[in-house]
Amino acid sequence: MTEMAVPRVALGTLGPLLGSGGQAKVYAVPSVRLPDVAGPLVFKHYRPGQEPPAGLHALVLRRLRMDLPTRDRLDVRTAWPVRTVQDGGAVCGVLMPLIPDDYFHTRYLPSGAADRSLCEFQHLFVDPERARRLGMPVPGRKARLALCRDFAGVMHLLHTNNFVIGDINAKNAVFRLNAGPSVRLVDCDAIRIRGDAAVLAQLNAPDWDPPERTLSQSTDLYKFGLLVLRTLCPGNGASLYRDPDHVRGVLDGRGYRLLADAIGASPRRRPTARDWGLYFTELLGAGAPTTRAARISAPVVTTSGWVRDPTTRQWVQAGSDGQT
């Protein structure tokens, strides 16, 4: 299949139901493969009355028109809509890559039953002692910093490709801790191209509302500040935190100022995803050379994919915007 849209009948017999929500049901589609997508796919089937308006095709087309390295990065970092699915000429759903197993966690209930669920960011806000009792993953400070850095990398990739995430919240990003802490965005059919109408209404989840009414890349940066605050300062009530003072003793003075600006009322003062990526990279000691520019003859690459351009001395994420 190479077309931007596929007919519902082409999916064949659907596999198991993988998830269900108010907007859609998600099914495995074991008989479907796409030449531009590595690995298995899922079918997100919108419920009657929840079908998206015009615009979903634009997200699919934008991905297909990306250069191969950028597209690969997008596929690794997001559950992006790769094809629309049509029934009777109308969009009824979307195909997306299957989220890998290592973004799931299995815990055992007191009954002995196994509960397998996505490692959503909301798990990181829970008091660590309570999380341990519930059998949930409890990453340490360094892993939490690495997850924040990786989320900044995802946001940088999307912002430099002219997308607005919009509804950043505790459930639409998932994480893994093995093979290096990393983040993947889900529910990406709610993302919009900057300047275009959203495919789905871009909303504010409870307790994630920014000062501005219109969602934009700037409100993405505000919500990312809330995510950093709540991820680095877990505990009772952490999902409601908005006071940057909570990070005193967790981040240094520079980090505190970045966070205070991020969740402040002035959109102009909010640090970019690149600003955050550079900060976390230096904080984690993954490379931040102090060598003078005259002695640098090639880009310096960090383990997180952030590079310092030898000419401009600017830090960018390799391969995300065509600069490196």
Image: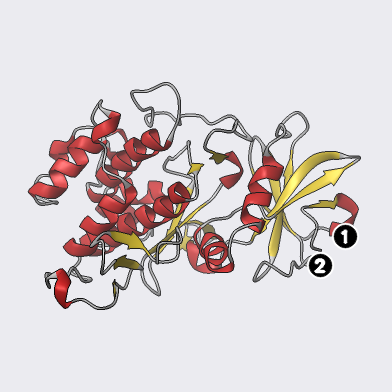
In front: 317, or 227?
317
> Looking at the picture, does residue 182 appear above or below residue 170?
below
How far across and down, in percent of the image, does residue 44 sit?
A: 70, 48
**41 horizontally vs 309: left or right:** right
Label whose residue precedes the other's in the sequence (2 or 1): 1
Mark sitting on residue 286: none
Sort mark 2 into few (<14), some (14-19) or many (20+) by Cα contacts within 10 Å. Answer: few
The residue drawn where x is 47% and y is 44% is 171
**Amino acid residing under circle 1:** Gly
Total tally of numbered discs in the picture: 2
**Amino acid residing under circle 2:** Ser
The residue drawn where x is 23% and y is 71% is 286
User: On the image, numbered disc 2 is attached to which residue?
Assistant: 31
Is the residue under label 1 in contact with that under label 2 (CB below 8 Å)?
Answer: yes
Mark sitting on residue 12: 1
Q: Where is the N terminus found, in terms of image quarters?
A: bottom right
**108 horizontally vs 282: left or right:** right
How far across and down, in percent of the image, does residue 313 sit?
A: 23, 62
In front: 83, or 248?
83
In front: 320, or 124?
320
Q: Is residue 73 visible?
A: yes
**34 horizontally vs 7: left or right:** left
| Label 2: element kind | loop
Q: Can you tell which quarter of the image residue 47 is in?
A: top right
How far across and down, in percent of the image, does residue 161 sit?
A: 49, 50
In three-dimensional space, the C-alpha distance between marks 2 and 1, rounded to whole angstroms, equals 7 Å
How far across and down, in percent of the image, does residue 43 sit?
A: 73, 53
Sort mark 1 into few (<14), some (14-19) or many (20+) by Cα contacts within 10 Å. Answer: few
Q: Is residue 247 visible?
A: no
Q: Where is the C terminus found, in terms of image quarters?
A: bottom left
> Looking at the picture, does residue 273 appear above or below residue 219?
below
